[in-house]
């Protein structure tokens, strides 16, 4: 009996020694039990535990621990990264570290025998919460070593003990709830996990306040839970709060801040905001290096994360260096077959795949797979990622059976751990679809592609409302390749499964111009909401954008001299836009229903046809450098589109477009454009008088009506061509405009330097139009010369017709090279925002362009109205915006989104229809065309017929399309 008591006493001494260690290190551990999280309290909890240990005389127990065991414990302790504390660490592809789990497993060899005594013996001298804390720490050990059933038992017992002893409102109980949340999340019980995360957060809020590091911990952990479950909007909001709280407590030079910023960077990476993510992670490494050093596991995590982002942005050399540095650091401390080393090699293999080093990638992935299997990690995201990567390598090597096997297993793991609505599950579905495509298993591939696109559409509906346009653009850029791959697949199997053509067109019209459509809807919903507070917020945002537009004309030296942080103002504008986008969604109508092809064609007459152009990159196992055009053609009542495929997209974008423009400019007969761009389409348009065109790619830069069919005979002579943003616009209800107000700007006084040519012809144009409009009962406001300022056009309030006759500009990327200031704007900013590359010139533009006396000339009105600024002009009830200026239809052409330039800006501003030019043309020809158009339109009010008739009338005088074909009309 004495021997037993002695053994029992020794066991408890050993147990409490371990518990003491656990209390001091538990904060470090759970970061690794799950990829994103840790769960315990930071500063205050450490202090409380330390005080408890001193008060309870645990040092006496320490003296009874054997020397051998003390050395072993010290060895284990040294293995921990003291930088972890209580924060979740987000890492690439939802994978964390095995390192700490293995250490805990090793530690468990010393402690597992002790746990049988817990709960059967009570130390009456302990404080009332000690037992619960001990249960909690023991549960964490089992959790880390993946003994989930035992972990659940001890966490449950911890909660019961704390509640029994009145501790349900303590930070210790919050810790227990957080542990249970992590466990539930690991087991895929997401509803339970979210509930417990929130409960832990509420306790920390009440006990430690919202300004505490404890509360910041919960903000981080719940935020990363939302990231894992695909609730990106909620995740970003929580991480931003956590960052602000942490910075307020101790500034940026601290480990918790680094971890939170890392997590936000990885969230942004998920959303496609790679440039911002890289900037954040480079900042993380700068702060973390003196704090964490090379031995830190977290520092290596940051390196791997940055490596991934470098890889995404094509910086392969930098990415490889990050991966290799992290691998070397791990190998110095761990064995080569340690899972952490294998995990980083998995990312290195993905890099090699991207560089077409398939043999190297396969070798590394197989090595990693063996390590994961040896460590019994068969149901983890690590293993799923490894299998998916290996499957993709096999697909590229045409080892399709092996590819299918690995990808199906990866998909099974994703389903079990993440569910079928997670983005990672959708990615693996698409990977498997590509395998079935190569196997020629059309049905299996088609079903998977449909599932992927349905999920993507749901992601867009869920995430777009709370994003700014810039964020939407980046997120859409991540999703769009899935659609392009599907279009290529549909082309390959269209003969054996014609329904694929319909599916392709439905996906195309659902997403064509999706960014423009979303932006316009936000504005419409706000202005029609009747909510004064929301409208005021919108006005605040537009005011901020106005200020930002002014600051784009400042040089870096001016900004520095005046202490202006332009990036900060840009971020503020972005945050306001996100608030508006999210709020406006509350006033949106029910979700848009899917539009099918027959709905569109049923709106056509017997003499109408639809021509819908889709521009895409060719996919053959991977994306190639070849481009192609798919043209969908429909007539009245047609159910399935006829299609024309132009395989020579590179030539259409290159040499043939250059030839077309040269023929226009040089006024020579064009013998190739009809054959290359239109004949195969025209063959399907017999007996058609009117063609609705929805264009893409280079077709946006071609005046279809100007293409000659034969010598002296042009397409304009045969049919009317109506340009639409999206072919489903045919379904839009007709708007009946009844007001008769016309606002004109013409012949601005650009300056006295002679650097910008005066346009006296625009004065004659305005006078002629004024005479016609007044005769038809219109109220005309004509602003010219020194009064035709940028400020005045910004004051415009939705006239029925806005007519602007001035110089337009578009700066291509090649023109901006080596120009720090371009049209009064910094070239680095025009590269970031395409709407800064084009615009209109108004009074005093010379001074604004040359930046003379820039500090004195830093006003809102510099005479240069960029497309970026046009967006904020109120044209919500404007039928026509007529841009009687050179090259107003030019801009950056983006596949699926049209032209980023004045056209887009005036559409966002609210204009229903826009007339704009594709090239420079003489004042006289422009004046005559505009006069003819107004005569026709204000007589018939049929804009399509009026525009076509004006072109044909002018063509009688000027035979070459250079004169009569420069202008195009686009809109509803």
Image: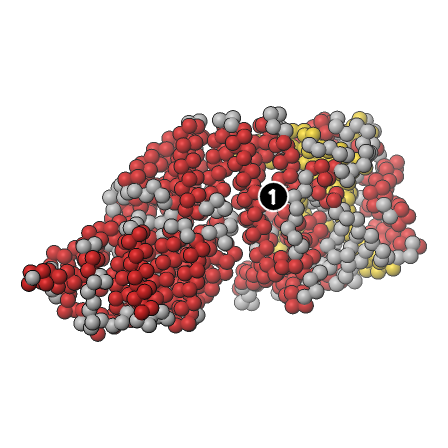
Is residue 172 rendered to the left or right of residue 931? left
Reading the image, the residue beneath label 1 is: 814
Query: Can residue 280 be seen here?
Result: no
In the rendered image, the residue lying farthest to the right is 775
Q: Nearer the viewer, residue 852 or 163?
A: 163
- Image height of 762 relative to 632, above or below: below
Q: Residues within 10 Å of mark 1 (few under 14, many from 20)?
A: few
The scheme the figure's colours follow is secondary structure
Residue 386 is drawn in which quadrant? top left
Residue shown at the point (77%, 61%) measured from the top left: 797
In the rendered image, the residue lying farthest to the left is 2
Residue 543 horizontal/vertical position (percent): 65, 64
Residue 45 horizontal/vertical position (percent): 31, 68
Residue 181 is drawn in which quadrant? bottom left
Is residue 790 rendered to the left or right of residue 448? right
Residue 297 horizontal/vertical position (percent): 31, 52
Q: Secondary structure at mark 1?
A: helix
Q: Nearer the viewer, residue 704 or 235?
A: 235
Query: Can residue 429 be seen here?
Result: yes
Q: Nearer the viewer, residue 371 or 287?
A: 371
- Image height of 67 relative to 957, above or below: below
Residue 340 horizontal/vertical position (percent): 31, 46
The number of numbered discs placed on residues in the rendered structure image is 1
Residue shown at the point (32%, 39%) measured from the top left: 368
Residue shown at the point (76%, 61%) measured from the top left: 796
Is residue 659 rendered to the left or right of residue 350? right
Q: Quick one: quadrant of the N terminus? A: bottom left
Residue shown at the point (58%, 27%) measured from the top left: 493
């Amino acid at each position: 009996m004495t021997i037993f008591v002695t053994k029992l006493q020794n066991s408890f001494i050993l147990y409490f020694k371990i518990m003491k260690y656990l209390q001091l290190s538990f904060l470090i551990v759970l970061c690794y039990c799950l990829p994103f999280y840790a769960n315990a309290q930071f500063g205050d909890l450490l202090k409380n535990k330390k005080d408890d240990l001193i008060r309870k005389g645990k040092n006496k127990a320490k003296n009874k621990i054997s020397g051998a065991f003390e050395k072993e414990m010290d060895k284990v302790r040294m293995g921990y990264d003291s930088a972890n504390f209580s924060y979740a660490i987000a890492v690439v592809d939802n994978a964390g570290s095995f390192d700490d789990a293995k250490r805990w497993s090793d530690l468990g060899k010393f402690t597992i025998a002790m746990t049988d005594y817990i709960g059967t013996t009570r130390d009456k001298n302990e404080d009332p919460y000690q037992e619960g804390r001990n249960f909690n720490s023991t549960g964490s050990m089992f959790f880390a070593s993946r003994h989930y059933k035992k972990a659940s038992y001890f966490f449950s017992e911890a909660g019961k003990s704390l509640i029994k002893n009145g501790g349900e409102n303590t930070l210790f109980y919050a810790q227990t709830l957080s542990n249970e949340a992590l466990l539930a999340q690991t087991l895929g019980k997401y509803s339970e996990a979210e509930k417990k995360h929130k409960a832990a957060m509420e306790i920390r809020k009440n006990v430690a306040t919202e300004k505490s590091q404890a509360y910041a911990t919960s903000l981080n952990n719940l935020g990363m839970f939302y990231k894992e479950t695909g609730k990106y909007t909620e995740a970003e909001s929580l991480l931003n709060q956590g960052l602000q709280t942490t910075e307020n407590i101790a500034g940026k030079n601290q480990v918790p801040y680094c971890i939170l910023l890392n997590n936000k960077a990885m969230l942004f990476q998920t959303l496609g905001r790679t440039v911002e993510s890289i900037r954040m992670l480079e900042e993380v490494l700068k702060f973390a290096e003196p704090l964490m050093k090379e031995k830190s596991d977290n520092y290596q995590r940051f390196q791997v994360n940055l490596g991934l982002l470098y890889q995404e942005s094509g910086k392969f050399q930098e990415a490889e260096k990050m991966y290799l540095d992290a691998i070397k650091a791990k190998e110095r401390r761990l064995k080569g077959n340690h899972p952490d080393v294998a995990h980083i090699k998995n990312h290195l293999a993905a890099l090699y795949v991207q560089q077409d080093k398939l043999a190297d990638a396969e070798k590394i992935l197989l090595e990693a797979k063996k390590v994961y299997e040896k460590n019994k990690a068969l149901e983890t995201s690590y293993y799923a990622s490894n299998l998916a990567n290996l499957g993709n390598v096999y697909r590229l090597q045409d080892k399709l059976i092996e590819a299918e096997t690995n990808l199906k297993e990866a998909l099974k793991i994703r389903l079990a751990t993440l569910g079928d609505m997670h983005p990672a599950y959708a990615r693996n579905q698409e990977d498997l679809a590509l395998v079935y495509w190569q196997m020629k298993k059309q049905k299996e591939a088609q079903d998977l592609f449909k599932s992927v696109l349905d999920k993507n559409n749901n992601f867009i509906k869920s995430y777009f409302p709370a994003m700014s346009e810039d964020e939407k653009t980046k997120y859409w850029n991540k999703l769009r390749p899935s659609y392009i791959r599907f279009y290529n697949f549909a082309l390959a199997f269209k003969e054996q499964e014609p329904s694929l053509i319909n599916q392709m067109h439905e996906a195309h019209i659902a997403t064509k111009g999706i960014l423009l459509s979303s932006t316009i809807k936000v504005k419409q919903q706000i202005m029609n909401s009747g909510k004064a507070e929301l409208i005021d917020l919108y006005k605040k945002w537009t005011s901020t954008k106005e200020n930002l537009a002014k600051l784009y004309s400042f040089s870096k030296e001016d900004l520095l001299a005046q202490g202006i942080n332009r990036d900060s103002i840009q971020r503020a504008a972005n945050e306001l836009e996100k608030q508006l986008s999210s709020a406006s969604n509350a006033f949106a109508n029910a979700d848009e229903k899917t539009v099918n092809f027959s709905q569109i064609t049923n709106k056509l007459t017997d003499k109408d046809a639809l021509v819908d152009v889709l521009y895409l990159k060719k996919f053959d196992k991977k994306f190639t450098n070849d481009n192609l055009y798919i043209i969908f053609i429909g007539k009245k009542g047609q159910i399935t589109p006829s299609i024309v495929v132009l395989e020579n997209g590179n030539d259409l974008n290159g040499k043939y477009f250059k030839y077309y423009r040269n023929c226009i400019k040089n006024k020579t007969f064009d013998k190739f454009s009809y054959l290359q761009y239109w004949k195969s389409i025209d063959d399907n348009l017999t007996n058609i008088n009117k063609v609705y065109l929805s264009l893409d790619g280079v077709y946006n830069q071609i005046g279809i009506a100007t293409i000659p069919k034969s010598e002296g005979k042009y397409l304009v002579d045969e049919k009317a061509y109506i340009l639409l943003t999206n072919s489903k616009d045919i379904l839009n209800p007709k708007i009946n405009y009844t007001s008769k107000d016309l606002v004109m700007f013409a012949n601005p006084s650009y300056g006295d330097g002679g650097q910008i040519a005066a346009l006296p012809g625009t004065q004659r144009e305005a006078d002629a139009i004024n005479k016609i409009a007044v005769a038809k009962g219109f109220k005309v406001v004509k602003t010219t010369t020194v009064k035709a300022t940028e400020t005045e056009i910004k004051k415009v309030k939705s006239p029925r017709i806005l007519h602007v006759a001035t110089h337009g500009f578009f700066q291509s990327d090649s023109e901006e090279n080596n120009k720090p200031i371009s049209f009064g704007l910094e070239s680095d900013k025009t590269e970031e925002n395409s709407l800064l590359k084009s615009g209109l010139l108004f009074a005093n533009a010379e001074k604004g362009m040359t930046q003379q006396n820039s500090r004195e000339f830093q006003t809102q009105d510099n005479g240069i109205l960029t497309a970026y600024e046009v967006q904020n002009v109120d044209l919500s009830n404007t039928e026509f915006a007529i841009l009687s200026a050179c090259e107003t239809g030019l801009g950056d052409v983006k596949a699926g989104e049209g032209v980023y330039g004045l056209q887009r800006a005036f559409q966002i501003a609210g204009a229903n229809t826009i007339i704009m030019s594709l090239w420079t043309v003489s004042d006289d020809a422009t004046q005559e065309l505009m006069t003819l158009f107004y005569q026709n339109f204000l007589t018939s009010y049929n804009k399509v017929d009026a525009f076509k008739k004006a072109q044909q009338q002018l063509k009688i005088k000027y035979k070459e399309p250079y004169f009569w074909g420069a202008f195009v009309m686009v809109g509803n």
